[in-house]
Amino acid sequence: MDSSDTITEEVCREDDVGDGQLLEVMVAGYPVLLVRNRKEFRALGSKCPHYGAPLSKGVLRGERLRCPWHGACFNVRTGDIEEYPALDCIPCFKVTVEDGKVFITAKKKDLESSLRVKDTSRRCLLNKNTMLLLGGGVAALVCAETLRQEGFTGRIIMATNEKHVPYDKSKLSKEMNLKAEDIYLRKPEFLEARGIELWTEKEAVSVDFQKQKVRFMDGSSQKYHQLLIATGSHSGFLKVPGADLQNICTLQSPEDSSKILELATGKNLVIVGASFIGMEVAAFLSDKAGTISVVEREEFPYQHALGPQVGGVAMKMLQNKGVKFHMKTELCELKGKDGKVTEAVLANGEHLPADVVVVGIGSVPNSVFLKGTSIARDDKGAILVNLHMQTNIPNVFAAGDVVTFPVALLDGDSSSIRHQQVAEAHGRCAALNMLRRGKELHTVPYFWSTLLGKSIRYAGRKGQREGNRISSHQLGLGLAELTWSSSSSGLAATVSLSPGPAGHPELLFFADLQCLGGHRGGTSLSKAMRGSKSVLFAPVTVPPVPPHTGSEVGSVAAAVPGLPEQALSHRLWEGIHGHCCEGKPGATEIPDLLHQVSESMASPCLGNRAQSSLLQPAEIPQRLHISWLSTKGSC
């Protein structure tokens, strides 16, 4: 390449960037992320390839940089993707330091792009091995791409009953005005260039595991050497009189999303179910539909997933936009005229006008075609896999929404987690084990939702057993957080509800600590930071409590008001994590530790606000509330 295409520019002085700091600089008019990590400088693409989040607002732990919006992780040394939902890497640029000045050298074409696609092997016709992937979602897509990235040169077939290439399903309920092409994750030519065959509208109807053959709805069949089942899940169906009327919809595809938007605009909309799909549809259509009524058998939205604290705040937000909630009841009948739905009848006797009904009542694994086979499934139809994503059948793997798998945060208890990021992690793990790499699944579930400009972020996994909630706060509209713990695993999950797209730094730190194995045993240390518009909840796991406390789980909430958000987050967490990872403090030393950390925060770079908020020893009892919760059994 011509040397004129390579640019070298001074971006700052060496002492302008502290160790562990993320700084966005400009090179030839393009933003570049400058990272100083362990006194070494790194320069990378400044935006997350997922949705374009500014990585300068992310969280750095060791060599791992976590996106502030949806939790994707990148290695700052290589730029490689280490955790999803992003599919691509970020570019890296050369950094030199001369006479205290920092220079970045980059090619213009690399500066223009915010992502770097991993190199892949090519299809070789001499390799007769066939990897057959059933499903067209992110689990199958990541599996296919990983196989090529890891050097597999045989045949890869993705067979899906969808009409499209893999697309971003999370946007179906969040942005219902988008066309299918607007949410494609990969274009057809991308797959073609990597020798990945995509068979659309190709639904599997049976599998012969002995002959290693799959039969499809159109009568054709395909043999495989190794099989991935990633057929996803579908919404539950209504089982009430009138369920066969027209304009009763589930949300499974871009076509469904467009249809619901068209039918509901200016009309009476009834939504059955107040979990993520129902709430997101209600939020998006709140200024478009004539009326919106949400019917839910529980007392609050998200009751089982996030609990009443977050659910209550979310419900109030939508009520303020005119959405009507009919809680602690359920749909018992649908009435219609000329074959179209006109009215919903509830168990409490209410009659709701209904020109269109959207059903969002649970998720059912797409595994009916496996009925009668020897593959192991649970009582809900989900395929059972181990940490290698292997089923009980040789050469058969499964991933994504169709599986139940061992969750480290629940001490290995199996669970179905139907999140995009988890499905992608499944796909990569399955691909590596199809190549005999012996890779175990290790990922921290990270989920997001949006309602009326506010964001819900959820990291970890809440156990289902009684007595595992350890801390919750509800502080008014837009201010909510909730954490859970199991008796043997410390803090297992945390959720935040906040303005804008960015996740709280504390939530991101929690996810990183879980990745480092922080979930394994011990006392839960938490810090709630209260601001005018949001609650920041900061969990961390510290060494186990003294033996005499038995199975108790400790929860410590420390409020330190008045400090700048970023400065407090980073400095307090660096101090706590530095001590905890070395296993220094015991439970009784937490107040001393917090005082030491608060002293370290009183540095010139934080100004007078930090100095004035320094915790003194006498203040510790007033600033800290320590509670011990006894939990029974283990999760």
Image: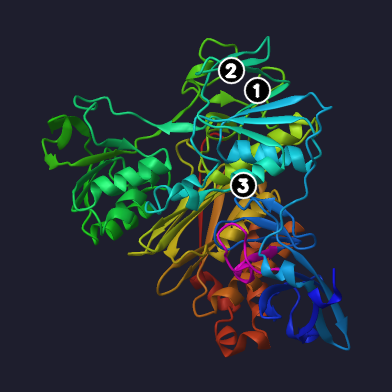
In the rendered view, tell whether residue 331 sits above or below residue 491. Answer: above
Type of amino acid under label 2? Ala
**Mark 3 Cα-neighbour bin, 10 Å: few <14, some 14–19, many ≥20:** many
305 relative position to 350: left or right: right
Residue 360 vs residue 7, the one in the foreground = 7
Does the magenta-highlighted stretch encompass residue 58? yes
Q: Which residues are magenta?
A: 45-60
Type of amino acid under label 3? Val
The residue indicated by pointer 1 is: 391
Colouring of the image: rainbow
In the picture, residue 120 is in which quadrant?
Answer: top right
Horizontal and vertical percent position of residue 40: 83, 72
Would you say the residues marked 3 and 1 are in contact, meaning their CB atoms lie under 8 Å apart?
no
Q: Nearer the viewer, mark 3 or mark 2?
A: 2
Q: CA distance from mark 3 to mark 2?
A: 25 Å
The residue indicated by pointer 3 is: 444
Residue located at (70% from left, 44% from top) = 193
Residue located at (82% from left, 78% from top) = 4
